[in-house]
Image: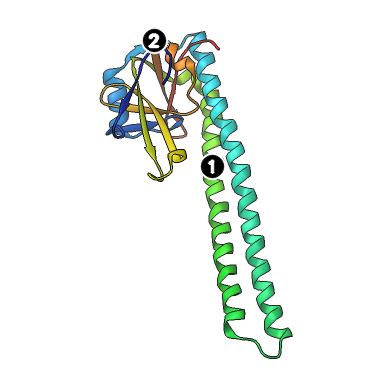
Amino acid sequence: MMNSEKSCRQIGRRPYRIQKNCTPIDAGSESLIRSKGIHCDFDDRLHRAFSSTVRQSSVRSSLGKGIILTFGAFSIGSGLLAMLIALITAFAAEITSKAAIIVPVIMGVIFIGAGVGLLIYSRKVKDFSSLCSQAEMLCDSAECFRFKFKLLRYTYWTNESDLESEVTEIYADLGELAVEIFNFSDKWERAEYAYAALIDVNGTHMFFFFNDEEQ
């Protein structure tokens, strides 16, 4: 349980409409933000809080991209090695079963395919990180909205027979829209208001959610 000024209510299922932080926002969610939030000035304090949120997201994306690239390269290397083993086996052995050749080839194809998929996905992560960096530079054109919010906690188990498989997701309930909060801290428990910044980055409508509590 959290000892906090703002209680975190346990819920039995995920909210119906969820918006992830630091991601593009769809027209329906944007309409709710504009209609339910209170438009406010983007003052220096909000500007600092917004910049901190964007930088943290960009850093996480860069780390994620590095990990994905590492696994992608490892997967492709393992696939090529498996293919090489199959070729050596085929040419070196006088009597070789088909399985001794086919199995490494299939494994090689699978590993190479997975590696290529990871490399392609890393490009998407790179593009997302670039959007976040551009958003920080374009923050003067951002629209900011203030919300009273409630904290929601959704808990589930990936394996119901294993208590250690518990997963907890925290959401800020804005009424008809909930925002998932990553890297949850007691700042959210202390905060009276949450803020949503909308900013257009090269035609992509981006959504950033933060509070202005000091560390």
Residue drawn 39% across the image and 45% down it: 161
Secondary element type, mark 2: loop
Work out how far the residue at label 2 is from the one at label 1, CA to CA, in angstroms. 32 Å
Q: Seen in the image, is 207 located left or right of residue 94?
A: left
Q: Quadrant of residue 133?
A: top right
| Horizontal side, residue 93 vs residue 5: left or right | right
Quarter of the image where the N terminus is located: top left
Name which residue lies at 58% across and 57% down: 115
Of residues 33 and 191, the one nearer the viewer is 191
Question: Which residue is the site of mark 2?
Answer: 192
Please tell me the numbered disc located at residue 197. Answer: none
SS category of the residue bearing label 1? helix
Q: Of the residues tagged 2 and 1, which is closer to the observer?
A: 2
Amino acid under disc 1: Val
Q: Quadrant of residue 130?
A: top right
Front residue of 149/34: it is: 149
Residue at image coords 58%, 84%: 98
Q: Is residue 35 left or right of residue 139?
A: left
Which quadrant: the C terminus? top right
**x and y percent of residue 2 in the render?**
43, 18
The residue to which callout 1 is attached is 125
Q: Position of residue 122 (x, y in %)?
A: 56, 47
Q: Residues within 10 Å of mark 1 (few under 14, many from 20)?
A: many
